């Protein structure tokens, strides 16, 4: 599976980030300069990014978010967005991502409007929300879309590539855009503390690979900087060093390598396998493949594979709302997989 252009990269990213709750995670934070200005003590912020720049002159009150993770950080910083890109694959019965629904309704606030995103981004719906800031630092926003959105409100896109940003950088740039850099750093510190507290001594020295599929015969491996891998690493497990041999198979804009099932033996040294499936039919067809069954971690059952779509999504994103929601569900599954190791 190779990216051959912007349309192809977008399709792969949505397959992974959308239908299967993926996204990227690497690269530098958007370059930023600040100068005194604005009103009510807010300093004008200029954020340069891959598609242009966002000049924010007043403290934002009506925020719209695109892609993944930005709405959660905005909420944690005290502002419920007026609109968010819909994410039906990971939503629960409420129609919202459960951690978003819990945080907003628990605070007695009004849930944000949802609109169609991706290639079919509903610009008119965003316009009707009258935003004063649009956050899309972890998204697949195109240049054409940005050019339309920036005429509506200052729009923050990704630093270098679609779907490519670390969780720390995402929180940092959102905090700067909202005029709350210190509060954003406090969120980062708290997340690190939660992850450190969840780490287990018995995870020390245990290696893992985080894989995915896009159908029979396929096999993808996430790089160590991808957010779901970063979450597992923070718990004390070690990314299988084989990942460094897979750079030649990199799929641009996904922070992963598509190596094909014929190369499944490259994962023979992984003590654990982390993965997910789009649905039970996908699980059955993938697990029925002989080469897949021959991966040592798979054959002995040392696999961590959440099945509920919200759980798959929550464990794919590191932000102030997903981490506490995910950890209480994730750690027991990891303990079960570790218990199957011959140690």
Image (cartoon, grey):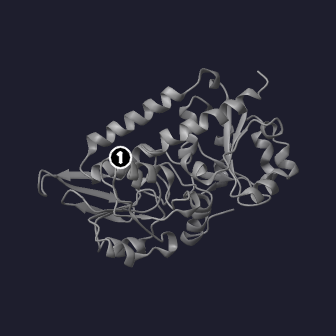
Label 1: element kind:
helix
Q: Residue furthest right?
A: 290
Q: In screen coordinates, is 340 left or right of 320?
A: right
Q: In screen coordinates, is 155 left or right of 258?
A: left
Which corner quadrant of the image does residue 131 belong to?
bottom left
Eyeballing the image, is 151 above or below 112? below
Query: In the picture, which quadrant includes the N terminus?
Result: bottom right
Tell me residue 181's x, y (percent). 27, 44
Q: Which residue is mark 1?
A: 76
Residue 226 in view here: no
Q: In screen coordinates, is 300 left or right of 242?
A: right
Tell me residue 323's x, y (percent). 49, 40
Residue 11 in view here: yes
Q: Residue furthest bottom?
A: 124
Tell me residue 284's x, y (percent). 81, 55
Eyeballing the image, is 260 above or below 241? below
Query: In the picture, which quadrant includes the C terminus?
Result: top right
Tell me residue 99's x, y (percent). 47, 49
Q: Residue at x 25, y 59 (%)?
A: 61
Which is nearer the eye, 34 or 210? 210
Q: In screen coordinates, is 209 left or right of 118?
A: right
Crowdedness of circle 1 by 10 Å Cα count: few (<14), some, many (20+)? some
């Amino acid at each position: 599976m190779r990216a051959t252009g912007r349309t192809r990269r977008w399709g792969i990213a949505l397959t992974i980030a959308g239908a299967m709750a993926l996204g990227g995670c690497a690269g530098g934070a958007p370059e930023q300069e600040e100068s005194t200005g604005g009103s009510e003590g807010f300093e004008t912020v200029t954020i340069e990014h891959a598609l242009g720049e966002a000049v924010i002159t007043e403290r934002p009150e009506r925020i719209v978010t695109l892609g993944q993770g930005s709405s959660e950080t905005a909420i944690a910083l005290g502002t419920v967005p007026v609109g968010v890109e819909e994410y039906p694959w990971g939503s629960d019965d409420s129609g919202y991502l459960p951690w978003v629904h819990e945080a907003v309704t628990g605070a007695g606030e009004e849930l944000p409007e949802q609109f169609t995103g991706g290639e079919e981004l509903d610009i008119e719906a965003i316009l009707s929300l009258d935003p004063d800031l649009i956050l899309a630092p972890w998204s697949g926003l195109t240049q054409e879309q940005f050019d339309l959105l920036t005429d509506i409100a200052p729009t923050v896109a990704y630093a270098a590539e679609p779907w490519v940003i670390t969780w720390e950088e995402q929180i940092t740039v959102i905090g700067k855009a909202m005029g709350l850099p210190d509060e954003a750093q406090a969120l980062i510190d708290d997340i690190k503390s939660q992850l450190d507290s969840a780490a287990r001594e018995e995870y020390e020295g245990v290696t893992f690979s985080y894989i995915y599929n896009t159908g029979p015969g396929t096999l993808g491996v996430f790089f160590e900087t991808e957010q779901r891998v970063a979450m597992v690493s923070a718990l004390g497990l070690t990314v299988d060093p084989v990942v460094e041999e897979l750079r030649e198979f990199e799929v641009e804009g996904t922070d992963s390598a598509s190596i094909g099932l014929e190369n499944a033996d490259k994962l023979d040294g992984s003590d654990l396998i982390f993965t997910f499936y789009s649905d039970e039919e996908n699980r059955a067809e993938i697990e029925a493949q002989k080469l897949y069954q021959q991966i040592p971690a798979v054959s002995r059952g040392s696999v961590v594979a959440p099945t509920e779509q919200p759980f798959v999504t929550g464990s794919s994103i590191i932000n102030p709302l997903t981490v506490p929601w995910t950890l209480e569900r994730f750690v027991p599954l990891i303990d079960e997989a570790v218990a199957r190791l011959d140690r």
